[in-house]
Image (cartoon, rainbow, N blue to C red):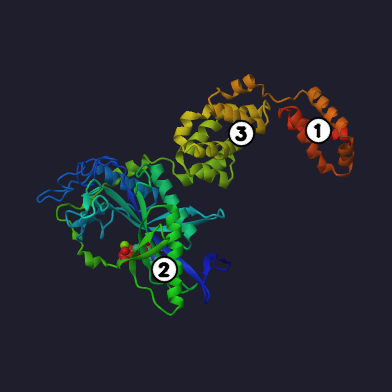
Amino acid sequence: MTDTATNTKLIQGRTGPWEIVMGLEIHAQVASKAKLFSGAAVGFGAGPNEQVSLVDAGFPGMLPTLNKWCVEQAVRTGLGLRAKINTFSQFDRKNYFYPDLPTGYQISQLYHPIVGEGVVEVEAEDGTFFNVGIERLHLEQDAGKLIHDLSPTESYVDLNRAGTALMEIVSRPDLRSPEEAVAYVKKIRTILIYLGTCDGDMEKGNLRADVNVSVRRPGEPFGTRCEIKNVNSFRFISQAIQYEARRQIEILEDGGSITQETRLFDPVKGETRSMRSKEEAHDYRYFPDPDLLPLEIEQAWIDEIKAGLPELPDDKRRRFMSQYGLSQYDAGVLISEQAKADYFEAAAKGRDAKLVSNWVTNELSARLAADGQGFDLGIVRFPPALLRELVELIEDATVSSKIAKEVFEYVWAGEGPPRHVVEARGLKQVTDTGAIEKAVDEIIAANPDKAAAVAEKPQAIGWFVGQVMKATGGKANPAAVNEILKAKLGIS
Ligand code: ADP
Ligand code: MG
């Protein structure tokens, strides 16, 4: 249900409409070979505790050393989010006890984050755009991992992840529906992947979101929010928000009030449940980490990083629309994945861009998905040059679009490049009007009643087109078939 006056998405409660308000804290693991403050390796799949330095393990007397690469990635990301880069920032200790945190504190940035305010443009389902404000981006360490299912009586700790660099990207409470929240996370993920600052792998937990949800009556001030921790898939984000909003609405409609708290989403039950009451900054006794100097960044370095940024998704979408004449929708599908966009550009050289775009987003995407492959692998399996050749065959009327799909399958199966397949399998389109006329004459002669009916009902010509195509093995040029049929059946 949409409130047309304010154009916000409302949900219907027992006592009237409600609006959901959301702000997200996205944790993105920095794409880095080493941790934020130690030289220990970062990687997935190492044995337990194989990637832990004395710094990560919190040994007494160890000193953190800031990893410049990680700082550069945070700056790159900030620039990609069109945000202010703070030339002065500082690291703070966030103190709390947990067995996966050997130092007893997490190094984070509370008071002076490396990146300040920014803005992200997100495309809604209906093709319109909305802006989401970025409040800040700061660098912090990840914690280790506790393993409870290896022994019935003991818990184990794996510190491989401890000290890994995270970028926490905090949005303003600008989101108004589960769809908007998901579209926002997708957009952030795409930007990060374009920038190369995070691999965006949500299954591995390299990108996850804390989702803050509150509800209010339309037009009223923001309500009290609950924070759902560590949601790591688009589907779970949507489910968690829907469940949580309903839960809050029910409490409020029953005359209750919302307690600000941290909750967990249980994907099996599809519900959120309370984890702990909301903690405040003072609960963590934040203070500047005395082991680390304030971080001062030179503007010249920021400018250098800026000059090295790749073309970002928004710019690419606009360029695809103007340079190739694609619709906003088609351009959006192509740029959603950098590899897909690159593939398209390589295949579109000198070809009908709209046709190439259709092939990339339809046949090729479907084929890759069916084989459980990504676009990068697709480039190896079906290089852009092959698609260019296939589209050329359609453009010069060597094959119809329908036969082209068959050719595509044979090429995919490894029978050789498109032109070769067309020759070898005799799939060339019949444009020889004599051959088509012969087929038309035979079919009309065999079906005089149907031919008479076409005079009354011209759309019945479709049946004849189908028969001629069948008779010619689908190779007849459809335009020629139509023309000849119309002439012979006496319709204009
Ligand atoms: P804290 O300092 O307690 O962590 P913040 O002001 O930093 O709170 O907000 C944390 C996140 O919660 C931000 O993403 C913000 O947009 C979001 N948020 C703040 N207020 C609300 C609200 N009333 N409803 C939903 N989300 C909110
Ligand atoms: Mg906060």
* Distance from mark 2 CB to nearest ligand 1 atom below 8 Å: yes
Question: Which label number is shown at residue 352?
Answer: 3
Whether residue 90 is visible here, answered yes or no, is: no
Extreme residue in the bottom direction: 255
Q: Residues within 10 Å of mark 2 (few under 14, many from 20)?
A: many
- Quick check: 166 left or right of 318? left
Q: Which mark is residue 214?
A: 2
> Which quarter of the rendered image does ligand 1 occupy?
bottom left
| Mark 3 and mark 1: Cα distance apart in space | 25 Å
Compared with 188, 438 (above or below) is above
What residue lies at 81% left-to-right and 33% top-to-bottom? Answer: 483
Q: Residues within 10 Å of mark 1 (few under 14, many from 20)?
A: few
Residue at image point 20% right, 44% down: 49
The mark that comes first in sequence, 2 or 3, is 2
Q: Amino acid at mark 2?
A: Ser
Q: Which mark is residue 178?
A: none
Q: Which residue is mark 1?
A: 483
